[in-house]
Amino acid sequence: MSKKDATDLLNRYRNGQVSGEEKALVESWYADYTQNAATPEIDDQELENNREEILRRIMSEMPGQRKINYRRLISIAALVILLIYISVLFVEQRKPHRDQPALVAKKDNNNLLPGGNKATLILSSGSSINLNDTKNGALANEKGIVIHKNANGRITYDQAGHNTTQEANVFNTVVTPKGGQYQLVLSDGTKVWLNAASTLKYPVIFTGTKREIELSGEAYFEVTHDQHKPFRIISNGQTVEVLGTHFNVNAYPDEKVTRTTLLEGSVKVLAGETSSQIKPGEQVQFKDGHLAVSQADIEEAIAWKKGFFYFKDDDIQTVMRQLSRWYDVSVKYEGQISTREFSGQMNKNITAAQLMHILSFEQIHYRIEDRTIIIMP
């Protein structure tokens, strides 16, 4: 394989043009590598020293053979992705500052591990259940509705044998902390994936002519169809109304814009006296009391559900808000805040130290003190 071919392979992966086999192998190897590799311990000089040796290994891989050993080839290519093209999976520098000297970020011993399956269930009585430590099986009984935690860590509501008078004001709440996410199935069969630092309040059983819940934060929904009971999500000053569909709502209080992205079906977003109905592939943005419809980047909207950070022309503050939620860290800024923009994706299973080290290759300078990431000029 020539140096040109090796570079082409990396570029195709970056642009999403590799085959399914190539993509799966790269991402599988990358996941293993980021858990065990010494990437955060590699500085600029080591990158330069390894550059030609790694390229030589790629170019000499399986010479003269028709059948390519893809696993070995992609493993080496992925190493180059990390060492030579360190920004391939994460950032593209949109506004280069060539006058700034390269700086390797200060190393730290605090890994700040990634988040996981964590949440608290608050019952109608006000009592709470820590879902992280609770064993699988029946958790509680709410007016005849049995709440279960399944083997896959999902909360479900079982109406079997429920023949008591239906209660309209019995609510449960699931709260995910920073560094946590969770899945649940509501009593009507609607599936919900709740992102970090989010709160979902819902009735244990839906009564009357509508199904209404409240969301703060971000969640992905697969709503069970019921033409007689529209499903409504109240979040951050807007209401999303659906019959049966797949969509994502990003309604974090610390974000300037609330985004509703539709994958399947049809939804209507209402804010005050205005409303917008969107089709699959579209997004409604709610800001300052106004609704605006645009074409959506579906990969960006649901990357979190697939286990990725995804950025598209985002500034450092937007990047760090996502990191803050996932790693449960505080973020502080010293001096002038960088105006650079970042695009790309990064697997969320790496540590905060690894991710910040990658950012340092884009002239983002930082230090970590306890559970605080400090961005420096």
Image: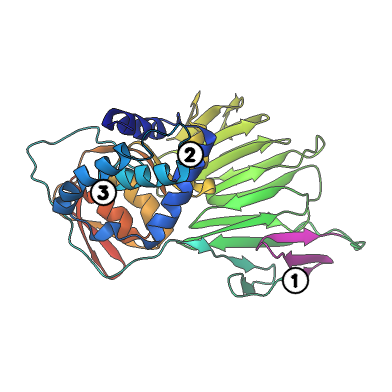
Given residues 96 and 170, the one toward you in this image is 96
- Along the polypeptide, which appears first: circle 1 or circle 2? 2
Q: Name the residue located 60 percent from the left edge and 55 percent from the top edge.
A: 200
What amino acid type should be assigned to the residue bearing mark 3?
A: Leu
Question: What distance separates the C-alpha of mark 2 from that of mark 3?
Answer: 23 Å
Magenta stretch secondary structure, dominant? strand
What amino acid type should be assigned to the residue bearing mark 1?
A: Gly
Residue 85, percent across and down? 27, 41
Looking at the picture, does residue 287 appear above or below residue 110? above
List the residue tagged with mark 2. 23
Foreground tag (2 vs 3): 2
- Along the polypeptide, which appears first: circle 1 or circle 3? 1
Residue 137, percent across and down? 75, 71
List the residue tagged with mark 3. 359
Res. 137 mark: 1
* Magenta run includes residue 144: yes
Looking at the picture, does residue 262 appear above or below residue 151? above
The stretch in magenta equals: 139-159
User: Alpha-carbon neighbours of circle 2 within 10 Å: few (<14), some, or many (≥20)?
Assistant: some
